[in-house]
Image (tube, rainbow, N blue to C red):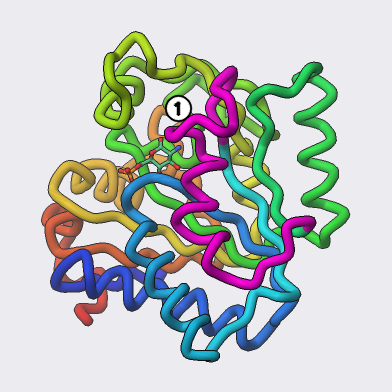
Amino acid sequence: MVIYVCDDYGKMSEVAANQFAAHLILKPNSVVGLATGSTPEGMYSELIKKYKKGEISFENAVSFNLDEYVDLPKENENSYYTFMHEKLFNHIDIKAENINIPDGNAKDFEKYVEEYEAKIESAGGIDLQILGIGQNAHIGFNEPDKVFLKKTSVVDLTQSTIDANSRFFDSIDEVPKKAISMGTGSIFKAKNILLLASGKSKAEAINNMINGEIDPQVPASILQLHSNVVVVIDKEAAELLDESTYIRI
Ligand code: GLP
């Protein structure tokens, strides 16, 4: 695991976008795994700038999103479908047919999750997976549990995640309680992983992910076993880490 610590959110977003762009330039037909949440928003803005300057193109890229709320219409302002289109897809040259976002309104979830997993496989697997992290160290919507979730599944959200997500909704009752999420196993199969975190509220999750036991109660801790993980965080998210373990940029 290579850990870069940046001064602030802006620098974190720039460094992450540079990493992302490097992958895309080296392999224009990259299969990218994308994340939602406020953390990667800045990186997506930087990628849009790079695209507009002609530095990168998504024309041949294929994307798979990590997760989506269950039973929230995709047109809802809080769906991850809407988020991804507003924050990235509407501003770049990715082909609509190459965008994959889990369908939170699928008719037969059992069948659908198998198909999503199979589609990732048939695209050749994920080259670069972008991740944020929840305050309880969840990745995607892989919540703390007794076992690591292997495959794309429908999951129950924990109260702490529902509370954290309530900032986007008018009332807590409107926050979805279930989501469809790529499993920790599906995420782990990615060839490269780029995890971002910003702010003090993520410091404990980041420390547990890097220095704690590998434990499904800390879903992100599985990344200790992955051979290609780059962590880009700001100094507040890094405040519990030993300075000797990271690169300050
Ligand atoms: C949600 C998403 C995660 C994301 C997390 C943190 O739970 N499913 O993919 O990492 O939120 O979000 P934020 O970046 O807004 O803190």
Q: Is mark 1 on a helix, strand or loop?
A: loop
Q: Where is residue 210 in the image (x, y as percent from the top left)?
A: 33, 53
Magenta extent: 68-97
Q: What residue type is labelled 1?
A: Glu
Work out which residue is located at the far right of the displayed protein and give it: 122
Determine whether 163 is above or below 95 in the image.
above
| Residue located 65% across and 87% down the image | 26
Say which quarter of the image contains residue 150.
top right
> Relative to residue 178, is residue 100 depicted above or below?
below
Question: Exactly how many numbered labels are in the figure?
Answer: 1
Q: Which residue is drawn at 29% across and 14% down?
A: 172
Work out whether residue 75 or residue 165 is closer to the camera in this orientation and state it: 75
- Percent across and percent down for residue 238 are 18, 59
- Res. 44 image quadrant: bottom left
| Between 239 and 116, the one nearer to me in the picture | 116
**Residue at the spot x=34%, y=38% of the render?**
134
Q: Quadrant of ligand 1?
A: top left
User: In this rendering, would 162 be left or right of 243?
Assistant: right
* Place of residue 185 in the rendered image (x, y in percent of width and height, measured from the top left): 65, 41
Task: Using the image, determine if residue 118 lies above or below residue 167.
Answer: below
